[in-house]
Image (cartoon, grey):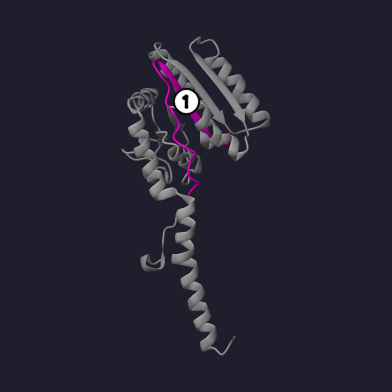
């Protein structure tokens, strides 16, 4: 399509109810949010967490995953227990499907240090927008439109075929962002680009209304009322 006929318009998400707080001391909380489709590669995330735990036994690691149901969720639980269940300083909670309001509450009701995604295929993930709005840095693979959200100001990009050491490096980098000023900056970036309240109105003003006016003019020229 022609560039002068094309316009990019993000949908966005509502602003968060305040900034998410970071963990203190040697605690580390990571949150992932996705279906359990193969392209999301949640088992690869489990393996990466196991590698992180092996290298950083000084950390108390808490992982929360939102999404999935049925047999796929049960299979993930079994695999997570197999790989992480015997590590005393690692805990995990697989929440399954949650209403949107409940998933947003996670960022407000407990410390969250990093939102993480290990997907091999993505669009422009809404889950990352939700995390970023709350000031949570994002560790994600450079798949699809992820690089439009994850920059050196908002998180850390992994290659799609990342190794466990790459994952650990990304986590350690973002652990240094656990301060309120950095979280304010992340939230401001996301609010400037992915705020649904302003994006929807902008889309109406710049895309819908002008075309309605043109259609009305065309109908008038053709003798229609």
Residue 51 highlighted magenta (yes or no) = no
Q: Specify few, some or many for label 1: CA neighbours under 10 Å numbering under 14, 14-19, or 20 or more.
A: some
Residue 21 highlighted magenta (yes or no) = yes
Label the magenta part by its dominant secondary structure.
loop
Q: Which residue is mark 1?
A: 111
Q: Considering depth in this image, is 47 or 22 the residue closer to the camera?
A: 22
Extent of the magenta region: 12-36
Q: Considering depth in this image, is 105 or 115 the residue closer to the camera?
A: 105
User: Seen from this angle, which residue lies furthest right?
Assistant: 70
* Location of residue 6 by image quarter: bottom left
Residue 191, percent across and down?
A: 41, 46
Q: In the image, is 132 to the left or to the right of 219? A: left
Camera sees residue 11: no
When the figure is inspected, residue 176 is found, relative to residue 104, above or below; the finding is above
**Looking at the rendering, in which quadrant would you find the C terminus?**
bottom right
Residue 159, percent across and down?
A: 37, 35
Residue 215, percent across and down?
A: 52, 78
When the figure is inspected, residue 89 is found, relative to residue 134, above or below; the finding is above
Q: Residue at x 61, y 22 (%)?
A: 77
Q: In the image, is 90 to the left or to the right of 175? A: right
Camera sees residue 102: yes
When the figure is inspected, residue 93 is found, relative to residue 181, above or below; the finding is above
Q: Secondary structure at mark 1?
A: loop
* Location of residue 115 by image quarter: top left
Q: Residue at x 50, y 47 (%)?
A: 13
């Amino acid at each position: 399509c022609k560039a002068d006929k094309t316009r990019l318009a993000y949908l966005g998400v509502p602003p968060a109810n305040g900034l998410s707080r970071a963990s203190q001391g040697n605690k580390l909380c990571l949150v992932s949010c996705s279906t359990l489709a193969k392209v999301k590669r949640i088992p690869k995330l489990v393996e990466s967490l196991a590698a992180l735990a092996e290298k950083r036994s000084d950390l108390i690691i808490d992982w929360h995953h939102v999404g999935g149901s049925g047999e796929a969720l049960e299979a993930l639980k079994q695999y997570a227990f197999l790989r992480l269940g015997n590590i005393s300083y690692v805990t995990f909670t697989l929440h399954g499907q949650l209403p949107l309001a409940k998933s947003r509450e996670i960022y407000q009701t407990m410390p969250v240090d990093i939102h993480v995604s290990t997907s091999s295929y993505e669009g422009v993930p809404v889950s990352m927008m939700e995390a970023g709005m709350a000031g949570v840095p994002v560790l994600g693979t450079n798949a699809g439109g992820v690089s439009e959200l994850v920059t050196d100001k908002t998180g850390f990009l992994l290659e799609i075929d990342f190794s466990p050491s790459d994952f650990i490096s990304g986590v350690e980098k973002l652990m240094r962002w656990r301060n309120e000023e950095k979280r304010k900056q992340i939230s401001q970036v996301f609010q400037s680009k992915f705020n649904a309240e302003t994006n929807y109105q902008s889309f109406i003003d710049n895309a819908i209304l002008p075309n309605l006016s043109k259609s009305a003019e065309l109908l008038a020229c053709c003798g229609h009322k």
